Amino acid sequence: MDDLKERLTALGARRSPPDDLLDRTLARFDERRRHRRIGGALAGIAAMLVLVAVLAVILTNREPSVPTFSRYHDPSGWSVDVPPGWTSQPFRFESISAGAEGVQISNVPLPDPKLPPGAWPAADQQALPADGVSIVVAPQVPPSIWMDGAVDLPMDFPGGWAEASISGALQPDLYETAFRGGEVTFIATVTIGVQASEVDRSTLREIVRSIRFDGLPTPNTNETASTSSPPVTASPAPEPELRREHDPFGWSVGVPAGWRSRQFGFASGSVSAEGIQISNVELPEPGL
């Protein structure tokens, strides 16, 4: 028994000769295992690089979301785009000397526009914040006045608009224009705060470009008439004959028969005025 143990110990302690077949086989096995590990790591890195490239292409080609504009339709026949986040506020007010009805579109909520004497309705400058933007559109009152300087749609901004002067430091910019729609002249005013952003200024330009005259609504002719009695058609009232009064500033107005038209002009200190007064009775010149 002891003799067998000594032989086995001697066998385990022997050295393999050079180029032993067993050693060469084990070495090749270890080398192949290392190559498989390296190849697997390289394949994982390549797959990750491909995934990153695909994501980059998707993000680059993705189209930016386009905000959806809502369409405002005015009862007087014109319409305009209202951007998201902006407000459209119809208004109507009358005074002893003037009245106005239209809509105000602004990037912030605002009170009704103001109608100073002798001016067009515009945003309330006291309520407009420094970054506020407003556009006011209304039919010309009275509608019979046809302004020779009115432009055709579509129109742009600020080209073709007259810049009105506002006294005082850090006051908003005020622009005015008139455009034609059907047989009516419309007036528009734009008020821009001194700190209005370029984004809101650009959006305002798109609003102006979107103004269209769609025409007055067509009466509903599908309503069935009552069969109890035949419809009675009233004879239309004859339209009065008007003579045309032309103002030196380029506008004109129809004067009915029997009415008076008087051109006036006066100056008082630093204030002056001239124009036309039309009345159904004889009146003195207007006062200021």
Image (cartoon, rainbow, N blue to C red):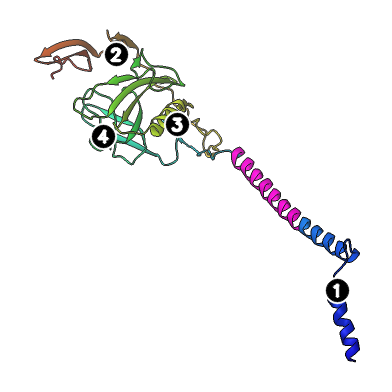
Amino acid on which disc 1 is placed: Arg
Is 51 colored magenta in this rendering?
A: yes
**Image coords of residue 74 (percent x, y):** 42, 33
- For the record, the magenta segment spans 37-61
Among the two numbered marks 3 and 4 on one chain, the one whose residue lies closer to the N terminus: 3
**Image coords of residue 145 (percent x, y):** 33, 17
Q: Nearer the viewer, mark 2 or mark 3?
A: 3
Residue of label 2: 255
Mark number displayed over residue 80: 3
Residue of label 1: 14
State the residue in front, 145 or 158: 158
Q: Nearer the viewer, mark 1 or mark 3?
A: 1
Disc 2 is placed on an element classified as strand
Is 66 colored magenta in this rendering?
A: no
Among the two numbered marks 1 and 3 on one chain, the one whose residue lies closer to the N terminus: 1
Answer with the quarter of the image where residue 156 lies: top left
State the residue in front, 101 or 28: 28
Distance between the Cα atoms at labels 2 and 1?
A: 133 Å
